[in-house]
């Protein structure tokens, strides 16, 4: 299947350059110059979005926040912002990566390929995974350490499954809560903190490694 990229940038010259490059590399590329046009292009179900931050009216960060709950594909920000706070804001908005302008097409291509490989492994990576001393059986919904089962509740395993299948990616509490409890769920994402605490306690009793890492100011990630 030909990978599909949605490129969102209000600079026509950049759009044309990047589009031509990825078409030459064998990608199907859709382009948009603003958030309204980009929203329409989502109907093409892109495999990855390249999103400029500095756009008129609705900027890339706001667009990302609005659509992130409805799409799962990686979002790479194209930005001239380089401070640590800008990176945190981008991650909290739902971005998966960023690349700073000006950038080389070779670097951009490498980033895109890396994220698409990760997505492919997540979707087709089989029914079990091994992380250090842990063996996670996704079909049986069980976690083992040195062949001993670690008991987890349904919701605890849901959290482990979501984070471990997306190892290395950072997710904020709100996104995890909405993903696992549902968009219309009553309650607060604060409950997630308690579930994470229980998971860590059980894992600590079986292994010395902390598999769920807190990324301060951003959320949580599974350490592979």
Image (cartoon, grey):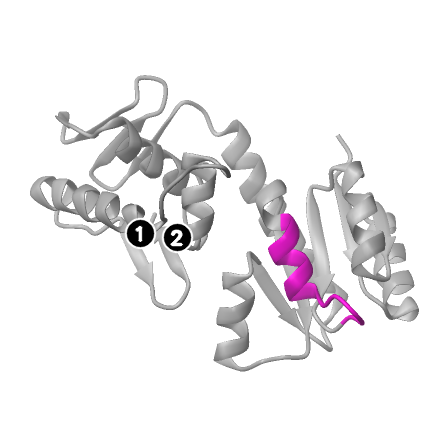
Q: Position of residue 110 (x, y in %)?
A: 65, 57
**Residue ranking furthest to the left:** 205
- Residue 37 vs 132, above or below: the answer is below
Residue projecting furthest to the top:
140
Q: Are marks 1 and 2 in contact (CB under 8 Å)?
A: yes
**Residue 180 is at least partly visible in this image:** yes
Q: Which residue is mark 2?
A: 173
Query: Residue visible at 78% across and 70% down?
Result: 55
- Residue stretch in magenta: 55-67
Residue 72 is at least partly visible in this image: no
Q: Which residue has dot 1 on it?
A: 190
Please state if 39 lies on the left or on the right of 152 as rendered: right
Place residue 214 in its image quadrant. bottom left
Q: For this rendering, which residue is in front, 93 or 21?
A: 93
- Helix, strand or loop at label 2? It is helix
Q: Earlier in the sequence, mark 1 or mark 2?
A: 2
């Amino acid at each position: 299947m030909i990978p599909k990229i949605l490129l969102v940038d209000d600079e026509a010259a950049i759009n044309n350059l990047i589009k031509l490059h990825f078409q030459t590399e064998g990608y199907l590329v859709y382009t948009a110059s603003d958030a309204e046009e980009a929203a329409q292009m989502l109907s093409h179900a892109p495999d990855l979005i390249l999103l400029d931050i500095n756009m008129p009216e609705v900027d890339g960060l706001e667009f990302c926040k609005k659509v992130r709950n409805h799409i799962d594909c990686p979002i790479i920000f194209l930005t001239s912002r380089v401070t640590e706070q800008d990176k945190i804001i981008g991650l909290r908005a739902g971005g998966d990566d960023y690349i700073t302008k000006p950038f080389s097409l070779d670097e951009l291509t490498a980033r895109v390929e890396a994220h698409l490989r990760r997505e492919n492994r997540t979707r087709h990576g089989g029914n079990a995974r091994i992380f250090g001393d842990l063996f996670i059986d996704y079909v049986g919904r069980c976690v083992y350490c040195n062949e001993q089962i670690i008991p987890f509740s349904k919701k605890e395993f849901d959290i482990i499954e979501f984070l471990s299948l997306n190892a290395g990616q950072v997710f904020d509490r709100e996104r995890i809560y909405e993903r696992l409890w549902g968009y219309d769920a009553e309650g607060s994402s604060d409950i997630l903190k308690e579930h994470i605490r229980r998971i860590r306690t059980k894992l600590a009793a079986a292994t010395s490694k902390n598999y769920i890492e807190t990324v301060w100011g951003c959320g949580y990630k599974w350490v592979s």
